[in-house]
Amino acid sequence: MAARTAPVETKRTKRQRAILPYLYLLPAFLVMSVITFYPLIYQVILSFTNFETKHLMLGMSSPDLENVGLKNYVDIITGGLPVQNFEFFRVLVYNIWWAVSNVALHVPAGVVIAVLLNVRGLWFKKIYRAIYILPVVVPPLVVATVWRNIFDEQYGAMNQVLTAFVGLFGGDPVRIRWLFEYVPPISWLLPTGALPLAYYAMMIANFWLGWPFMTLVATGALQSIPSDLYEAAAIDGASNAQQFWRITVPLLRPAMVPAAVYGFTLSFNLFNFVYFMTGGGPARSTEILVTFAYDLVRNLRLYGVAAAFAVIIFFVALTVFLVTNRITRATESYAEA
Amino acid sequence: MTSAVQTSKKKNIFMRFLTMNTSGEASGRELPLWRQLLLQLLTLLIAAAVMFPIMYVITMSLSSVSTRPSSLELFPKEISLDAFKQVLDRPTANPVTFWELLKNSFLLSFGVGLAALLVAVTAAYAFSRFNFKLRQILMILVFIPLLMPAIGLMTPLFLMMNSFRIFDCGSGMIAIQPFLSCASTGKLLFNLRDSLLGVGIAMISGALPFAVWNLKGYLDTIPKELEEAAAIDGADSNQVFFRIVLPLAAPQLAVTFFLGFIGHWQEFAMPWLFLTKPESYTLAMTLYNMTGQYANAIPWNRFSAMAIIVAAPVAVIYIALQKQIVGGLTLGGVKG
């Protein structure tokens, strides 16, 4: 008897068990289907229309809402938008360059400072550690507004510091228009257009914001490197520089690569910071993809174009993810090998 | 899946960073004095660079001078709370009090954080513990919106929220669009887009998949043995979830909530796009309004006081939860 009822029992519990995970998923997927998945689809539909402010009242049922096919996409890519100073590929290249140059500065600086703080017998380490962590703690939005004021042409601290410095040699007060000067300091740097002064100002501010996180990660990784490695190397006569390049750097790599990838993604979509510092100006020269997307919907109110642009951003983000994921995976196997 | 491994590895970095053995007693090698001094010079320079904007803002906020600074001051000459008082008294030119702004910011960050967490937790549990047919597909489905930068979904959300409106058609009739509309043009009573509720719903759209993904990573790190033991003792899946998994995950739920809170506290783009009425503005929006070319009338000491007020809750939460936050940050690395 027992042998005959048992399969029936398990069949029922099996069915229950098969349904159970879906019950657990139900609330989240119900909510997401309305406010996450539906908007994703709605976005694609919108991107084929000429939805503008005049359609806001009646929405998709507006009589003069037209299906314009791929026009929005073509306009974005070929510069056919009724928007000044916008070329898609210039913004894309600038956006990639912005993220790459940030990470390229933050990671080495973070590693070097972590190594510096890790030197045996350095005085006041705890105080330095507590201070160095501060930029991680302050919200980026506040950091951006404060730096915006620091770079103010008339009253900003940066020009005041430079004035004091130049004053030592009897120079005139410095009045650099950090965020608004359009003439680029170095005219040949990027193939798609020179970097404005505001880019360098933002690099300075974002450097202040960015390196401490890398130092945090690097310090953690440094602590896990066994000290006998260094002792053995020292016995074999390796110099400090050799120890750094042959032991520290390779052993930090598995920790720093994911951190760099994280930093890249973060910088690539750094909306609040860019929007608060320059708003993409002057003349859209520091615009990144997300700030332009925001401008399309908030100020220009070209909803159809904005939707198409967001779809393009999605594919850019997907590409970035696939590439960075590859890099992370590659270094993982490197670490295991 | 790899993210879970990363968390456990990096979880304590922040704590280790501050508390690790720094005496240097372990090795017999002493740092030569000239090198010590050189390194001190370097570390001091870095500390000065880090402190520069912080001292700049603190000094300005404690100053009673409401004209813009003509020379650089990095140490407070006076300790005056005038700027803070003025900000608390009348933060903007609009007829809105500081406490309303604070309430709006708090409601949004608290509400969105809590709602996302409550809805996400069971889904995260299902992904973490069950093996079912559609698991892979559904997980990818949750991941897709994570790839999209938060700005990317704003257009459809804006239009969706904007289409939900309540009209007073006159003669006691009320119409709720998009389900009903007035025969003639009515008076607009309520636009979901222009309300904190609408912004909150729109923010949950991004917060929810993130919370599911994040919590799944956390739940993966909780050992399954306890659950298996409970199952052997005859507990069904619901009992296991409510009696064992939830209590065990409570600290991490709290961390996820606070991480969300920090993020939503700084949310600017969505409210700035949706809200038009000054009484529903948030603190982040107010801070934005206090800088830039249209803010010539705002004294910088008041701006600095506001900056410190906006930064304070985030800094406090960070310092209180320092241990867990770096782990959470690297875990959330997929979202820009």
Image (cartoon, coloured by chain):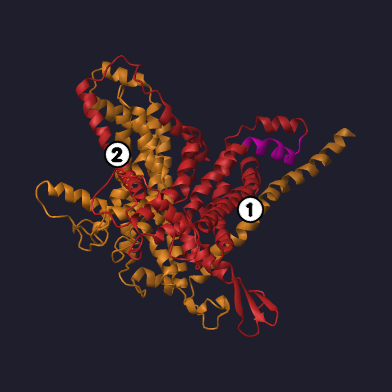
Chain colours: A orange, B red
Q: Can I make out residue A141 in this image? A: no
The residue sitting at 53% across, 58% down in the picture is B100
Instruction: Please identify, in this view, whether the residue under mark 1 or under mark 2 is nearer the observer.
Output: 2
Amino acid type of the residue tagged 2 in the rendering? Ala
- Please, what is the dominant secondary structure of the magenta stretch? helix
Percent position of residue B147, x then y: 48, 54
What residue is shown at x 66% (from left), y 36% (from top)? B247
Residue positioned most to the top: B28
Horizontal side of B225 relative to B17 (left or right) equals right
Q: Place residue B226 in its image quadrant.
A: top right
Look at the image and give the residue range highlighted in magenta.
B235-248
The residue indicated by pointer 2 is A109
Camera-side residue: B125 or B211? B211
Q: Is residue B228 above or below residue B289?
A: above
Specify few, some or many for label 1: CA neighbours under 10 Å numbering under 14, 14-19, or 20 or more: many
Of all chains, the one bearing label 2 is A
The residue that mark 1 highlights is: A28
Residue A272 % position (x, y): 41, 56
Find residue B189 and report its image quarter. Answer: bottom right
- Res B34 quadrant in image: top left
User: Mark 1 falls on what kind of element?
Assistant: helix
